[in-house]
Amino acid sequence: MKAFKTVVAAVPLLAAFLPAISVAQASSDWKYEASLYMFLSDIGGRVTFPATGASSDVSVGIDEILDAMKMGFMGSFEARRGRWGVFTDVAYMDVGNDQENSKALSIGQQEIPADVNVRLSLDLKLWAVTLLGTYALVADPDFKLDAMAGTRLLDVRPSVDYSLTGNLGSIALPDHSGRREVKEQNWDILVGLKGRASFGSDGAWFVPYYVDLGTGESRLTYQLSAGVGYTFGWGDVVASWRYLDYRFKAGKPIEELNFNGPQLAAVFRW
């Protein structure tokens, strides 16, 4: 929360201390930009599935098992008129994996004994939808900086099937196998900055950057991205590194969740 307040305070201060907000006059015509991208992310975190009936709760370390994307769609869209605009980003992932002799599972407060074999199948479906209003603090052809404010919805639906074999004497009978699932929908308020800095003799190369920070139904969420891109006549190709982190409030079934990895995007402008 302290970091969130710092960013909120920094945005208006940044605008106030930019002596020349823009060298180029912002156009009064509508401008549009759309991108399709692939986020090749590692996924980390931990989910605790609540107890059912006589059974104990079940916890799974996500980073220890998830490594396969079954389906996904990712894209963004921006509309801008003058200095004002609206930006939206939509990502859908369906990822999962099966493991034999997995070490990612714990039941109640106890780890699974070493001589017990755990067969584990974990699936995670996720929607992340971001909607932000933008304002151009700097609109120079070689350097752009936008302030942003808005919201992000995170809809996460993990499920797990597991079965235990071996020396199960210390594990209660209802916990020898089972299926658990939870549904978590999370809204947060965001502030942030995004933009790009061109370099090279013709300005075709550029460094894109993005940061947002928020809180609400999450204790804290933040996202960072930076990379390198090249401009063509039709648009841009961008390679970047992206990190998205969620810290959930106490009592939530999903304790934490993070996405970390390279992203490749094709950006179209008209």
Image (cartoon, rainbow, N blue to C red):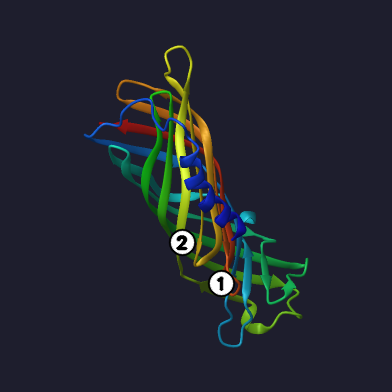
Q: What is the tally of numbered marks visible in this picture?
A: 2
The answer to whether residue 186 is left or right of residue 115 is left
The answer to whether residue 157 is left or right of residue 34 is right
Q: Amino acid at mark 1?
A: Lys
Task: Identify the residue at image location x=49%, y=60%.
Answer: 124
Which residue is label 1 attached to?
252
Task: Identify the residue at image location x=64%, y=79%.
Answer: 175
- Whether residue 46 appears in this view of the structure is yes
Say if 137 sits above or below 5 in the image: above
Q: Percent x, y for residue 14?
A: 50, 41
Q: Percent x, y for residue 4?
A: 56, 56
- Along the line of sight, which residue is nearer the eye, 143 or 161? 143
Task: Identify the residue at image location x=52%, y=40%.
Answer: 225
Question: Badge 1, how many Cα within 10 Å: few under 14, some, many 20+?
Answer: some
- Frontmost of labels 1 and 2 is 2
Say if 237 sits above or below 148 in the image: above
Which residue is label 2 attached to?
188
In 3D space, how far apart are the residues under numbered discs 1 and 2 (Cα atoms)?
15 Å
Residue 183, numbered circle: none
Q: Farthest residue in the left direction? A: 29
Q: Place residue 53 in its image quadrant.
A: bottom right
Q: Percent x, y for residue 118?
A: 66, 66
- Along the line of sight, which residue is nearer the eye, 68 or 246? 246
The mark that comes first in sequence, 1 or 2, is 2
- Along the line of sight, which residue is nearer the eye, 140 or 232? 140
Is disc 2 placed on a helix, strand or loop?
A: strand
Q: Amino acid at mark 2?
A: Asp
Question: Badge 2, how many Cα within 10 Å: few under 14, some, many 20+?
Answer: some
Image quadrant containing the C terminus: top left
Say if 98 sits above or below 182 in the image: above
Is disc 1 placed on a helix, strand or loop?
A: loop
Q: Percent x, y for residue 41?
A: 54, 45
